[in-house]
Amino acid sequence: MIVNLTQHVATEDQRAAGVFEPSGKEEVQRLLTFETLPSPEEVRRRAAALAQIAEESGATEAMIGGAPFLMAPLEEMLMGRGITPLYAFSRRETTEEMLPDGNVRKTCVFRHAGFVPAVE
């Protein structure tokens, strides 16, 4: 069971791989959003709150992502609760389309390709 601790809703491919949204997704999004420069204490507090949400959801793993300065403390807090932090891995599929006016439209689609566990 992989809880989604990112700001984004899990993709269909991620859901098929076992990712689920926590109840109170809005709180997860709030904890991941920084509008002002945080203190180290604020970063640790938010990491602990996110780890608590993961634990309360019954997850054994957590898909994480967000501000780089939050990820290491979040990894630590999750591991301390026996929850494995995971990072989503995606393949970029790019297509190019020639438009009637001679311009080219380039489209990138990111396809979920698995998870990379945090390295201790």
Image (tube, helix red, strand yellow):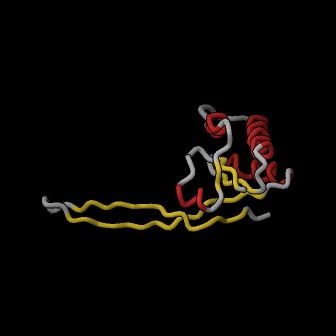
Report the residue at 57% width, 51% height from top. Answer: 10
Residue 5 place in picture, x, y as percent? 66, 47
x, y percent for residue 92: 46, 66
Q: Residue at x 59, y 60 (%)?
A: 16
Q: How many marks?
A: 0
Query: Residue visible at 56% across and 46% down?
Result: 8
The residue sitting at 15% across, 62% down in the picture is 102
10 relative to 97, above or below: above
Q: Vertically, is 35 above or below 97? A: above
The image quarter containing residue 52 is top right
Q: Which is nearer the eye, 57 or 54? A: 57
Judge whether 13 appears above or below 21 on screen. Answer: below
Residue 110 image offset from top left, x and y in percent: 47, 61
Q: Is residue 71 left or right of residue 81?
A: left
Q: Is residue 22 above or below residue 39?
A: below
Q: Where is the C terminus found, in terms of image quarters?
A: bottom right
Asked whether, in this view, residue 110 is left or right of residue 6, the answer is left
Instruction: Indicate the quadrant where residue 57 lies.
Output: top right
Residue 33 location, quadrant = top right
Q: In this orientation, does residue 31 appear? A: no
